[in-house]
Image (tube, rainbow, N blue to C red):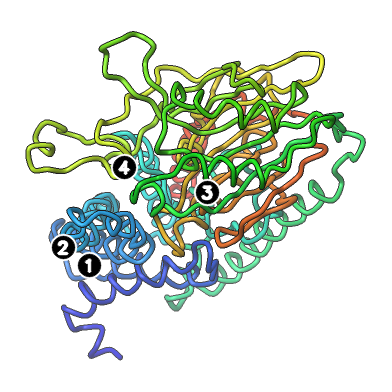
Amino acid sequence: MKKVIKNHLFLFLLFPFFLGIFTSFSLPPYNFILINFITFPMLLFIVFKLKESKKKIYSFFKVGWIFGFGYFLSNLYWITYSLTFYEDFKIFIPIALILIPAFLGIFYGLIIALLFKLDFKKKITAILIFSLIFSIIEFLRGNILGGFPWNLIAFSWSFSTSFLQILSFIGTYSFNLISITIFTLPFVFIFKNYKKIQLGIFFTLLFIIGTNYIYGFKVINNKNKSNLNYSSQKIKIISPKISIDKFINNPDEKSILIDLIKLSNPKKNIPTIFIWPEGALTGIYFNELSKYSDLFSSNFSNNHLIIMGINTQNSIKNTGQIYNSMIAVDNNLQLLAKYNKNKLVPFGEFLPFEKLFKKAGLKKLSYGYESFSSGKERKIISINNKIININFLPLICYEIIYSGSINPNDKSYNLIINLSEDGWFGNSIGPFQHFTHSVFRAIEEGKNIIRSANNGISAYVDSNGEIINKLESTERGVIEVNNFTNSKKTLFSRVGNKMFFYFILFYIILIFFINKKET
């Protein structure tokens, strides 16, 4: 083994690559969380060996980049599924498969490069500094250049909502910092002559993990059942599983509408809110929906509200602006509310450098040739009349992945409605990862989440992140919601990501204190 470790290629290239791949299996849907207790200490051990060998900073960056490349290659391969629907995009599959992990790996390269001056004589301090730098870079990854906070290490805990209840206080990024610390603590077990510290670390791990689980377990099991809001109106979450091929190959909007209405099964005398997903009516604009008004008026009544994802156009002529929107309409297709998606997916919903790419004959991946315009604000949608009463925060597709920034001010709502189309990613791990963000947002914000996804996971998630009902991405069906827990303001919903900066300050003070005491 010593001879293998001394091999430069294995230790500094192949080993970090495989560590990154193995680490990705701690994420949903696998959640082999024990892997992290091996891979993170081993990654820090490689840094220790680099320091011992007096390698230059470039070698540190290279190890981190290779680890990140393996990590993201393994857990983001599913993005390439979206390139299989159009012949012109298929040539980009190998490029996307390599280029996206290669770019994201740069963040991990920076993490390890910043450890170049780390003093490994003080092991606990080294663990804390490693965790702090790792979590700060992950925060930057989730926020700069539009942000891509996908597959943070904290999502490894998603197999149990009992472990996640702390999110309501500290949020995802602070939890990510603590998680990296917990996973890296076994680093001290690699060395001899640290028996007292090793014993202390072992019991510290048990205490932190056990205490957090017991707290979360009590929160979930001691929920005040009287806090349930029983409503005279039903909410029906529709998961139609309409193939994306239908939109690419001459979409038949009328047959799709008939299918949606049949699945919705409206009862005219029962007040009901129907939630239709993003992507179900991709081939038509809202203003064109009026030609099917008879389908709505004959099947729905004034006891009904339909919330759906659909493309809309700017009411001002000749602007050329189109939006990916969430709308609420009555049985006469009267527009009661509209939200235009704020966070658009590059290449999926708009083309960066559009003029250049159009000359090459390319378009955005979603239906239509023009790029979507982004909405400028996100407000609570309130519809209150004698029959229908609902206040909700609208989020379309991956807008739900942004911790602490989905709506930092107004909390006067009980529900978050998230519409999505996950069919672009096939039967891969992508839809599972996407859905996990919904659970995290529910706990952070203390809000119930209604998620309607075409070819994705549709669900009703309560304000503690408990999945009350769910339809898998392979299933077609309806979820009925008759009650939901009343809104509660969490500490994190009030403070947001300021909490993460408080944790950074706490870690800096802790590092300074331990550095003074540690021998």
| Residue marked by disc 1 | 50
Which callout, 1 or 4, points at the residue further toward the start of the chain? 1
Q: Which mark is residue 454?
A: 3
Three-letter amino acid code of the residue under disc 2:
Ser
Residues at marks 4 and 2, CA–CA distance in whole angstroms: 36 Å
Q: Is residue 27 left or right of residue 205?
A: left
> Hey, what amino acid is under mark 1?
Leu
Instruction: Work out whether mark 1 precedes mark 2 in sequence or the reverse, and give the earlier one.
Output: 1
Q: Mark 4 Cα within 10 Å, few/some/many (few <14, many 20+)?
A: some
SS label for mark 3: strand
- Mark 2 neighbour density, 10 Å: few (under 14) some (14–19) many (20 or more): some
Q: Label 4, secondary structure: give it.
A: loop
**Which-is-in-front pick, marks 2 and 3?**
3
Q: Earlier in the sequence, mark 2 or mark 3?
A: 2
For the question of whether residue 286 can be seen, the reply is yes
The C terminus lies in which quarter of the figure?
bottom left
- Residue 319: x, y in percent? 27, 13
**CA distance separating discs 2 and 3:** 45 Å
Residue 282: give x, y in percent of width and height. Answer: 42, 38
Reading the image, the residue beneath label 2 is 59
From this viewpoint, which residue is outermost toward the top? 316
Alpha carbons under labels 1 and 2: distance apart: 8 Å
Badge 1 crowding class, 10 Å Cα cut-off, few under 14, some 14 to 19, many 20 or more, is some
Q: Could you tell me how far apart the alpha carbons at marks 4 and 3 are, in whole angstroms?
A: 16 Å
For disc 4, the marked residue is 348
Label 3 sits on what residue type?
A: Asn
N-terminal of the pair, mark 4 or mark 2, is 2
